[in-house]
Image (cartoon, rainbow, N blue to C red):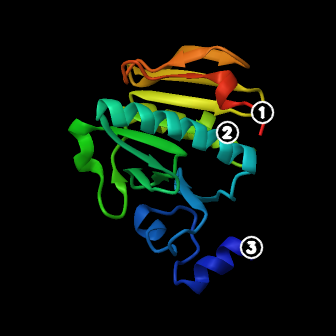
Amino acid sequence: MGNLELSLEKIGIPVKESYTYRDYALLPEGAPYQLIGGKLIMTPAPGTFHQVVVIRLVERLLEYNAKEKAGQVLVAPVDVYLEERETYQPDIIFISRERLSIIEPARVAGPPDVVMEVLSPSTAYYDLKSKARIYAKHGVKEYWIVDPEDKSIEVYTGQDGGLGLHQRVQGKGKVSSLLLAEFAVEAAEVFAAL
């Protein structure tokens, strides 16, 4: 029996092939898991450079939002419930002022307008594949993939139930949001050495 199974049994969650949000909600606060495709996927704490990149993006997003008063910025860990077998903890999310009602006390119940994922070795596969498909299916309007390893930022926009690449920079160059008018970041600043 693995660590996950032992941990689940300790808190009274039966071990099974597929989990739902009901099971996920029984996990202790701060448990390092996401519910992806009905599986409880452990997401260990990211490295320090990952955190620095997240903070730099959040700073710029908060500066933008302070000026524009466009909505709400939230950062991980915050549960984003999309369907019974899909609850994620994106690095950064933005919810427009008109949709603030999806923010509940325990979770965000529905797709954020903008999701930003900073890739790390333990989550990159899910961020690029499974989660991207579910975000598209549920109508996330903009999905940012930020890769500290190759210093790239890709901005995808929702289109026809999928996500289409809108912009990509690597190393240097500016990327802009289509959804958040006049919000842009310079890759060289985001990935500057510590």
C-beta proximity under 8 Å, tags 2 and 1: yes
In the rendered structure, the answer to whether residue 69 lies left or right of residue 38 reads: left
The answer to whether the residue labelled 3 contacts the one labelled 1, judged by CB atoms less than 8 Å apart, is no
**Residue at the disc numbered 3:** 2
- Which residue sits at x=72%, y=74%? 3
Q: Residues within 10 Å of mark 1 (few under 14, many from 20)?
A: few
Which residue is disc 1 drawn over? 149
Label 3 CA crowd tier, 10 Å (few <14, some 14–19, many 20+): few
Instruction: Please give the label number shown on residue 119.
Output: 2
Whether residue 129 sits left or right of residue 152 in the image: it is left
Callout 1 amino acid: Glu
The Cα atoms of the two marked residues, 2 and 3, are separated by 26 Å
Q: Position of residue 80 (x, y in %)?
A: 42, 51
Give the spatial CA distance, label 2 vs label 1. 8 Å
Q: Residue, x 46% and y 51% (percent of image)?
A: 86
> Mark 2 vs mark 1: which is more N-terminal?
2
Whole-percent x and y of residue 158?
A: 41, 23
User: Residue shown at 54%/29% (left/top)?
Assistant: 144
Circle 1 SS class? loop
Decide: marks 2, 3 in contact (CB < 8 A)? no
Viewer-proximal residue, 20 or 65? 65
Q: Is residue 68 visible?
A: yes
Helix, strand or loop at mark 3: loop
Disc on the earlier residue, 2 or 3: 3
* Residue 182 % position (x, y): 40, 18
